[in-house]
Image: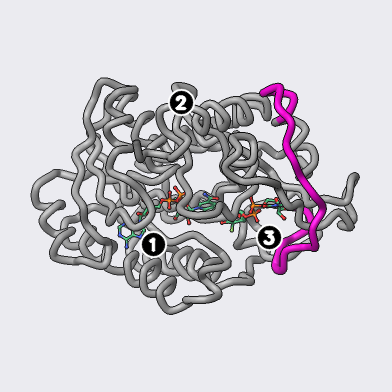
Amino acid sequence: MTVLVTGGTGYIGSHTCVLLLEAGHDVVVIDNLSNSSEKSLERVEEITGKKATFYKCDILDTEGMRKVFSAHKIDAVIHFAGLKAVGESVAIPLKYYDNNITGTLRLLEVMGEFGVKKMVFSSSATVYGVTDKMPLTEDLPTSANSPYGQTKLMIEQILTDLCVSDDSWKITLLRYFNPVGAHESGKIGENPRGIPNNLMPYITQVASGKLAQLSIFGDDYPTKDGTGVRDYIHVVDLADGHLKALDKLDAQKGVEIYNLGTGVGYSVLDLVHAFEEANDLKINYKIAPRRPGDVTVCYADATKAARELGWSAKKNVVDMCRDSWRWQKNNPNGYEA
Ligand code: NAD
Ligand code: UFG
């Protein structure tokens, strides 16, 4: 089928393009390049020997999207495009609401006009808010503690309401846990602008000498070693979840929600030590105060995805650490020469 991938030059989008092309799909990408480089798609072509069609286009640009939908007979959309930095969303909430929510509304409007009514959407475990109920199941109540989280919650609601209003829409909400790792070729990976917010890219930049020291945000949480626990998932496994969701869309009625995680929690210190062992390196770190807004523990119950999509994570923490490091080592400045 022909799949439109919004945000397809980004971290998760580029890995998903690889798997889509390898599975024989035609891939059309739109991205405004606000947080990515078009070069990622050249690398996707190097990996797969196949080309995705790229349009530099904003999801706020209704006319621009109409041109893309006119030029291709799109069968389904995987919707990654969005701003994703939690801290930044607190500082500039209107930009986040406009980009993520208005952008999604415009995309849906154009999809409706062209009769394209199948979508896989990037949601996040952040919609579970603060809860002690671990592992997290899809039926738990949701809440948000940042404008970013609010955008994910609101978009989930909008997509649900749309499916209720018109049963010809089929939409899958995928709630990602903590994506890390990179394609094993070392050609594509996460390419944060400036100083990374997230743990794995921070670790890899300390390993490369780009950053001096990792700050571990809190060692007084009620966990086995006092550091926060997360469900890290390899980005290639995550990408594969999108293909499985796409395969099931035709048979689906309305909205479905799936957690994409491994179901296993690792502490910050676990991940640092796993990285050191997997790559035979030492990571310079210190203990720093807690980061405001961080939850203590967060890991998935991923059995619904296993049962209904036939999907489960295959790669382990050693793969995540090796692949993250290979990408960073081979591309110290990301996609820039
Ligand atoms: P990313 O920033 O690498 O990719 C997002 C892409 O969307 C970028 O290429 C960016 O340029 C593009 N984009 C942003 N606004 C746009 C707009 N208005 N028009 C067109 N393109 C636009 O991020 P990612 O990690 O690949 O995340 C993809 C999706 O998954 C996002 O929606 C994100 O919120 C969600 N998600 C990510 C994580 C994570 O930790 N990486 C966790 C949960 C959910
Ligand atoms: N951490 C550090 N030092 C750092 C960065 C992170 O100790 O320099 C710790 C955090 O305190 C947390 C863990 O590492 O305990 C993971 O932090 P990340 O920033 O990598 O990931 P989060 O779980 O905070 O956030 C991620 C995504 C968000 C998403 C959230 C819930 O980045 O977009 O998961 O899905 F909202």
Residue 257 horizontal/vertical position (percent):
53, 52
Q: As shown in the figure, which amino acid type bears the numbered disc 2?
A: Gly
Q: As shown in the figure, which amino acid type bears the numbered disc 3?
A: Leu
Residue behind mark 2: 186
Name the disc covering residue 140, or none.
3
C-alpha gap between disc 1 and disc 3: 20 Å
Determine if the magenta segment contains residue 184: no
Mark with earlier residue (2, 3): 3
**Pair 2/1: label in front:** 2
**What residue appears at the point 37 percent right and 66 percent down from the top-left corner?**
162
Residue behind mark 1: 163
Report crowding for label 1: few under 14, some 14 to 19, many 20 or more residues within 10 A (C-alpha).
some
Relative to 12, 288 lies left or right: right
Colour basis: one colour
Front residue (pair 202, 161): 202
Task: Report the span colored magenta.
Answer: 276-298
**Is label 1's Cβ within 8 Å of ligand 1?**
no
Q: Secondary structure at mark 1?
A: helix
- The answer to whether 335 is drawn above or below residue 131 in the figure is above
